[in-house]
Amino acid sequence: MKRLTAYIALMVTSVLILVLSLMPDSPFNEINWALLSVLIVGIAILMFFISFEKRSVDPKEMALIATMASLAGISRIPFAAIMSVQPTTFIVMITGYVFGGQTGFITGAVAALVSNFFLGQGPWTPWQMFCWGFCGLLAGFIGKFSNNFNHKAFAVLAFVCGYLFGWAMNIWHWVGFVYPLTIKTFIATYLASFPFDTLHAVGNVVFSIVFGKSFYLILTRFKRRLHVNKERL
Amino acid sequence: MIPLYREKDNLIYKLHPFTIAFFIFAIFFLSLIFTHPVYLLSLLAVVFILIVDSGNFKEWKGYLKIAIPLVLIIIIINALFVRVGSTVIYSGPRLPFIGKVRITLEALAYGAGMGVRLMTIISIFCFYTYTVQPDRFMKLFSRFGNKTVFIVTLSIRLFPLMISDYRRIMEVQRCRGVKIDSGGFRNRIKNTFPIVSVLLLSSLERSFQQAESMYARGYGSGKRTVYNRELWRIRDYMIITMTVIAIIAGVASYIKGFGTYSYYPVLTHFDISEFNLLYIVITALIFPAILDWGWKKWPILKLKI
């Protein structure tokens, strides 16, 4: 809970600085956003990983996260030619949906990091780590409320995540390379990415309709095997 | 198509992973704080020299395919939407949403400057991809979080394994007469479906076996020991010192206002005295390439450092 509070505080501060920087007379007007935004995202990811380190995790869960992350990362490769359509978001989300938000976040972040070792690291890596992690986190959140696979809710969330992913990724593009940082250039950057985001969102929905149920069943089977209750034996 | 780390025979590959990561971080940091076109261009030149020197020019050319469209997008967005500049080159008809088209020299120059920045960043990450071995780099962090590092190294290792698994399952399916490469789109998806399920099932099964073997070997039962250590050599200290000098000079030039350049409202002229600190930055950053040149020329240097 403490970490969640710190996390929210970080987000509020960064939004506050953003708002201040838009006002002409504040001292934050000339701040180097390209640098600061990378820093904020880096800290946000770091906090998730620190809380993961603090928790006692058994080897089974670690091996499972690594497997799902590399599966999600691999699924980017055959689709690298068609930009923005890939099952990675779906795999991260279904992992989060079944195993909870934190596992989902770590899976997404590791998937982005590892697949970029093969596809090329870049300043986009922390952003992708954050975005995919966040998709996993959101899916984990809705996964809490259903005992069965709610394919409608999942597909809707997958659709939304497609857009959220693109919108968050646009921020680094806008902050780093566009000047002045006004509403107009902001909207322009977002309009430019709109077709790609739509493709991503539609792809997510298709993947979750085609693979959703069977992935859910396989993963829940392994989830049950993950924790053996010794008293019931 | 997939970029792969391959060890080559030069100094860059014989450094401690921290040294090379720190060096790359320094260039990334400097390229973000500078806005002056000359500073950015010289950073790009430094990166280019290092890429050629480490023998990765061919790989870098592949990166251009991604980089050039991105640079063009940046220039176009800046030229179309920014109307702070005062030197109008072209003023055109009214368009929906954008308003009146008014392309200014300043916006074009800013777009070009930011294009150079993006090129530098992409090139330095290309340099990173080809010169830093992921496992050695990840081991740097194992002191702080060995669970995370373990997960990352395990997934790096699983990557090629899963690809070969996928091929194996494909072959089995083909032998059974399942048509994966021919037939309609719908049919192909229907036939790929079991492959993905089998891949998921078998890799999860393997992950549990792996975890059980880890448990049997007592993973996490005590303090973590280290299997192999990276050596710190004189060359690492030399390069780190030079990088620190470059960062200090770069930050100093940023504070003094040399490294920044105001594109708006009118492009300002700059004089040569602004570049005094830049010479230090460049010399310090190019040092690994010079050292590598000396290393190839005099074998005695290879022995000593």
Image (spheres, coloured by chain):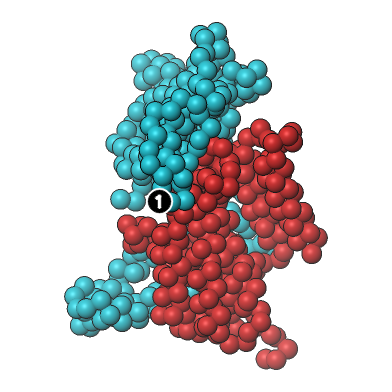
Image position of B248 with respect to A83: above or below: above
- Residue located beneath label 1 in the image: A119
Shown colour of chain B: cyan
Query: Residue at point 52% right, 9% down?
Result: B271
Q: Quadrant of the N terminus of chain A?
A: bottom right
Q: State which quadrant residue A54 falls in.
A: bottom right
The chain containing the residue under callout 1 comes to A
Q: Position of residue A2 (x, y in %)?
A: 80, 60
Q: For label 1, count other residues whose C-alpha is less than 10 Å away and answer few (under 14), some (14-19) or many (20+).
A: many
Q: Which chain is red?
A: A
Q: Amino acid at mark 1?
A: Leu
Query: Residue at point 34% right, 59% down?
Result: A82
Mark 1 lies on a secondary structure that is: helix
Furthest residue toward front = B93
Q: Position of residue A193 (x, y in %)?
A: 45, 54
Q: Quadrant of the C terminus of chain A?
A: bottom right
